[in-house]
Amino acid sequence: MANIDKFLRYVKIDTQSDDTTGTTPSTEKQKDLSRLLVKELKELGLEDAYMDEYGIVYAHLKGEGDKIGLNAHVDTALEVTGKNVNPQIHHYDGKDIKLNDQYTLSTKQFPILDRFVGCDLVTTDGTTLLGADDKAGIAIIMSVLEYLHNHPEVKHHNLSIAFTVDEEIGEGPKHFSLEKMDADYAFTVDGALIDCVDFENFDAQGFEMTIQGVSVHPGEGKGKLINAILVLNDFINNMPKNDTPFEAGYDDGYWHINDVSGSSDKVTISMILRDFCREKLEKRDEIIKNNIKRLLEKYPGISIEYSFKEQYENMKKYVEKNPKPLEVAQEAIRKNGLEPKSTKIRGGTDGATFSKMGLVTPNLGTGSYNHHGRFEFLVIQEYEKMIQIVLDIVKL
Ligand SMILES: [Zn+2]
């Protein structure tokens, strides 16, 4: 049970990030776990382990052959508190699991549970998230390192470890150093299903627009007053139909309005645009630009300012150029009796940005599910198997 003890220890340390502080790390408490990891890494013989000023941990273990990077993030999601996590272990017999008086983990709501009858699950007590995202990833990497420490006869590749901060607020790669990491290719251990190696994610942009209308006294408005809210309404009505998250299927992108604010004089809208390929995303930009052009012609006197912001990129093209990590992971998954799969990540990953920076980094599973909420759980048998899979990735 030693491997699961690591996980149970890490989840009790509150490391929730915060998207309002503007600092790195966004919360000092992330360093509590980073510091502990440095200490444990040193005990496992990774003597160069250290935490930089941003709370990011780097460490290296000498071996032979490729320099393989392993990454997980110390922070937890923002949706539910990560304070006072009180993990519960259940032998799952297929019946609903009562987390507390208010919340029940049921197959009706989460049919994936059906796969895990007969397994042991770690759940929350219903009052917090579990933080398996991504402390399961950290504990898997640490368990692999512990195994190698206890089995010096096992030959392995050179390993480069990085535990990053602020992944949940999209800032994991912000101060990440490829030089300090020093790897040929890497893996984020930050997914769910253990037979998956994921290497496709969205191409993502943000879009902001401010419409300045024409204000005059409404009583004198005839032929003069142009209400910015109504212009925005016209803009929205002319966006493509059936193309929002509500309609979007597994392979589809979308446009989504995050926020609208303002008055009849001036309104601001912020949106996100998502697609699995660059050309499709660029087509969305064209549609928006044409929509704006149309408004400017239709409403003389208004002004519009807008900008597109690159958020993250689909890592697929980088993995296709350097498929070695994908092949290595697939082989390790097969070796453990599973048929490797890949799913499309309908979001971004730190690995996607690392790939863009030059370090190809597909994502591996952890055997934990329902991330970011109180229904999060970890399947101990899958977690143990994932440790084996990662071991097989790094072994010679
Ligand atoms: Zn994560």
Image (cartoon, rainbow, N blue to C red):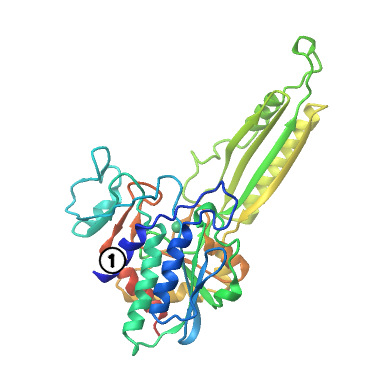
How packed mark 1 is, by other alpha carbons closer than 10 Å (few <14, some 14-19, many 20 or more), is few
Please say if 363 is above or below 280. Answer: below
Please say if 356 is above or below 245. Answer: below
Percent position (x, y) of residue 68?
Answer: 49, 78
Q: Residue at horizontal 59%, vertical 72%?
A: 178
**One can see residue 189 in this view:** no
In the depicted view, which residue is nearer to us: 265 or 275?
265
Disc 1 secondary structure class: helix
User: With 61 as the anchor, is 256 left or right in this view?
Assistant: right
Q: Quadrant of residue 276?
A: bottom right
**One can see residue 39 in this view:** yes
In the depicted view, which residue is nearer to us: 249 or 292?
292
Q: Residue furthest top?
A: 219
Percent position (x, y) of residue 342?
Answer: 43, 63
In the depicted view, which residue is nearer to us: 329 or 101?
101
Dot 1 beta carbon under 8 Å from ligand 1: no
Circle 1 residue = 5
Identify the amino acid type marked 1: Asp
In the depicted view, which residue is nearer to us: 212 or 24?
24
Q: Residue at horizontal 38%, vertical 77%?
A: 145
Q: Quadrant of ligand 1?
A: bottom left
Please say if 256 is above or below 141. Answer: above
